[in-house]
Amino acid sequence: MPSGNAPKRLALPRSSKKALKGAKVLGAVKPDERIEVTVRVRRRAATPDAEQARAAGKPLSRDQFRDLFGADPAEVAQIEDFAHRHGLTVLEADLSERKVRLGGPAAAMKAAFGATLNYYSIGKTKFRGRTGAVTVPEDVHPLIEGVFGLDNRPAVRPHFRFRSPSKPSGKQAAGKAKAMKPRAAGGDGSFTPPQVAQLYQFPAGLNGAGQTIGILELGGGYAASDLQTYFSGLNITAPQVVAVSVDGGQNAPTGDPNSADGEVLLDIEVAGAVAPGARLAVYFAPNTDAGFLDMLTSAIHDTIHAPGVISISWGSAESNWTAQALQDFDSHCNDAALLGITVCVASGDNGYTDSTDPNETAASVDFPASSPNVLACGGTFLQGSGSTIANESVWNDLQQGGGATGGGISAVFPVPSFQQSVTLPQPVNAGAGPGRGVPDIAGDADPRSGYLIQVDGQQGVIGGTSAVAPLWAGLIALLNQGLGKSVGFLTPRLYQLPAGASAFNDVTSGDNGGYQAAQGWDACTGLGSPNGTALLEALKTA
């Protein structure tokens, strides 16, 4: 621990955090409680080579990225020295992820980072929380962009919904698994993922071979028996699925399909069914800001599985994040773009407010979907006739107590260059300025036209924009295979496609409670749902 005259301490910008609304203080954190945190180190100083590489727009090799955009080894060493001075253990350091993981007792963490730590409860959930800003000694202050993990409150929620009234219960989940029976498209309104892919004309003759899809999960898990039953019932060879642990997160199915298990199986089964030749790397981490951030960077810089596309079906309203977490997550989505990795993110299931409170009227968009460095995925209600689309409109079941696609205007991120060519609506919130429009594209998400999924031994129909992110991730795996190279940061390229490319089904009817569908881009379904074959051809000639 430091002794003598203490060095001057400075607050980290954008690190201030408030107690969670409605949370009850249970008492101070025990001094000997072990805590692990991630310290994010700034990028190394910009060089002409780095600017040239960024301007070229071509995917970088991992070695190039580390040397041009990673952390400076000397500055990482300074952070390690700071940790040792405060009695903390260095658990891990990574230049590409700009990450130094530290562990130690709460008393040492409090001394190192000047944090006020208490135990809280909200409902049945108990967590460790911090309030105020993080402070550090002035010698390391310029080197640190953020500190994550002091607070372990739940960070985000999954964006999936079972179709009512057939939501299975935990007791039902204990029953015997049934074989999947593919049904005629539109027979009861639901679809298997291959049927959705057929309606969206995913390119034939491709199965994602040679590609890896990364799937990020913050709870729950999958059983191999569910995957075997599901894919054999669809007469599809099951894809290779591997679980990857981050920060102690594990593939831990609960046995209750209403838990995060529903999210995990939805993601795997949708992506795997439309791209069964791809390998699926499923990353598990604790549902905290540190866990989510570390899982993202681990997937982006994973040299073993090396995903070319990442699917994220978890998020929360922009206002629920600290500014440092928003900045950090977005910066790593930009890293993914530099490495040629596409990041698909669900836009949320609670309409234009992104809130579960039915009395909320203020508009908000979901993050990380609002990051300008991702492909934000909105939701539709899809009706098929045979192998063609009969009708498609904005998903909005709010009047019946259901959900609706997230979408709107970011209050954090400015309008990105690729959206300068589209007409963005005026924000619902009075006095709000222009910002990044969400979503970019869309796909089937309404539980009424949802996906037949196997979860914890039971079949159910699940919707939500959580289904759209893995659907598009599967499509991108097919595109990467068909092109023979990664599409990389796909989002700007979609906005640049010529009007006659027919790569999208323009969705022009419906609303999400605050924003209306329209011709061209809108704040409900973006550019529209995909025509996969036309999109592949457009990318070949673009």
Image: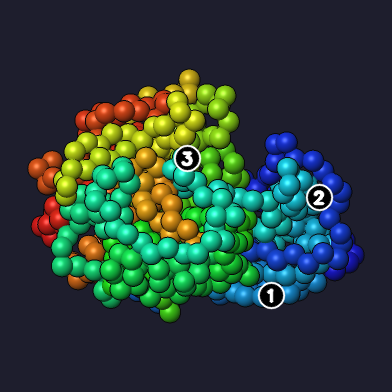
Residue 242 placement (x, y as % from top left): 45, 74
Q: CA distance from mark 3 to mark 2?
A: 41 Å
Q: Quadrant of the C terminus?
A: bottom left
Q: Residue at x 57, y 38 (%)?
A: 319
Q: Nearer the viewer, mark 1 or mark 2?
A: 2
Disc 2 secondary structure class: strand
The reply to whether residue 171 is visible in this rendering is yes
Is the residue 505 above or below the residue 338 in the image?
A: above
Q: Residue at x 60, y 50 (%)?
A: 155
Which residue was labeled with disc 3?
A: 165
Disc 3 secondary structure class: loop
Question: Mark 1 is on which residue type?
Answer: Val
Q: Which mark is residue 90?
A: 1
Q: Nearer the viewer, mark 1 or mark 3?
A: 3
Q: CA distance from mark 1 to mark 3?
A: 51 Å
Q: Are marks 3 and 2 in contact (CB under 8 Å)?
A: no
Quarter of the image holding residue 69?
A: bottom left
Is the residue 460 above or below the residue 23 in the image?
A: below
Q: Residue at x 15, y 67 (%)?
A: 205
Quarter of the image holding residue 520?
A: top left
Question: Mark 2 is on which residue type?
Answer: Asn
Quarter of the image holding residue 9?
A: bottom right
Is the residue 411 above or below the residue 432 in the image?
A: below
Q: Quadrant of the N terminus?
A: bottom right
Residue 14 placement (x, y as % from top left): 62, 45
Q: Bin the neighbour count of mark 3 within 10 Å (Cα to Cα): few under 14, some 14-19, many 20 and up.
A: few
Which residue was labeled with disc 2?
A: 118
Decide which of 102, 539 is in the foreground and name it: 539
Q: Are marks 1 and 3 in contact (CB under 8 Å)?
A: no
Looking at marks 1 and 3 on the same chain, the residue that comes earlier in the sequence is marked by 1
Question: Mark 3 is on which residue type?
Answer: Pro
